[in-house]
Image (cartoon, rainbow, N blue to C red):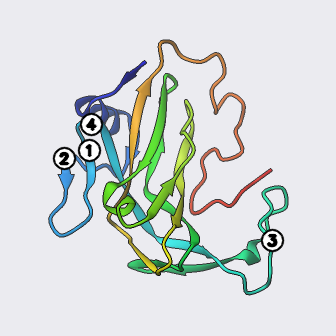
Amino acid sequence: MTVMPDHWITRMAQDHGMIDPFVAGQTRDGVISYGVSSYGYDARMSREFQIFTNLDSAIVDPKNFDPNSLVEREGDVCIIPPNSFALARTMEYFRIPRDILAICLGKSTYARCGIIVNVTPLEPEWEGHVTLEISNTTPLPARVYTGEGVCQFLFIKGDAPPDISYADRSGKYMRQTGITPPRL
């Protein structure tokens, strides 16, 4: 297995639509950086997000998810309450090649503030906007900026393509747009 470098990411984005919109190089002046880096791509958070709330005393159940446990917001920032959680999505739409697995890690600028970004792996031939799970582990409200870098994707090339890709098995999160809550 090999982690793919910047020139491969750029070629796959520009010639094959792997990342759209794609930012060549890194934008960093006055913002949390985004765009292609040495061995990854720093994705941006869109202007739409959903914040967990306990207004209706909902219980979070992945088998029977209650949308009343979330409040929808849109704007230039997302304020995540103390010890709470929000869902967001990437601005970028990803199309993962058949022989690639993409792994997401949070940006160090946020991690050093107690803001953790979690994303499950993007499997071979998955495509869509990535739903981001953002946790505020601090006892203080936390601000996350839209249109700026929030996480980094690493692209790992397998030794051989899988027998069955995410697209082959018609995965339940295939071609998702917007923020996608849990599905069973």
Three-letter code, disc 3? Ile
The number of numbered discs placed on residues in the rendered structure image is 4
> Which numbered disc, 4 or 1, marks the residue closer to the eye?
1
Rendered image: mark on residue 36: 1
**Which residue is under mark 3?**
59
Q: Residue furthest right?
A: 64
Rendered image: mark on residue 25: 2
Determine whether label 4 and label 1 are within 8 Å by CB. yes
- For the residues marked 4 and 1, what is the alpha-carbon distance in whole angstroms? 7 Å
Coordinates of residue 145 in the picture (x, y in percent): 36, 72
- For the residues marked 1 and 2, what is the alpha-carbon distance in whole angstroms? 5 Å
Characterize the local packing of mark 3: few (<14), some (14-19) or many (20 or more) Cα atoms within 10 angstroms. Answer: few
Is label 4 in a helix, a strand or a loop? helix
Q: Earlier in the sequence, mark 4 or mark 1?
A: 4
Q: Earlier in the sequence, mark 1 or mark 2?
A: 2
Coordinates of residue 137 in the picture (x, y in percent): 51, 67
Q: Is 46 situated left or right of 14 in this image?
A: right
Three-letter code, disc 1? Val
Is label 1 in a helix, a strand or a loop? strand
Residue 123: quarter of image: top right
**Which residue is under mark 4?**
10
* Picture quarter with the N terminus: top left
Q: Earlier in the sequence, mark 1 or mark 3?
A: 1
> Which numbered disc, 1 or 3, marks the residue closer to the eye?
3
Is label 3 in a helix, a strand or a loop? loop
Is 165 placed above or below 48 here?
A: above
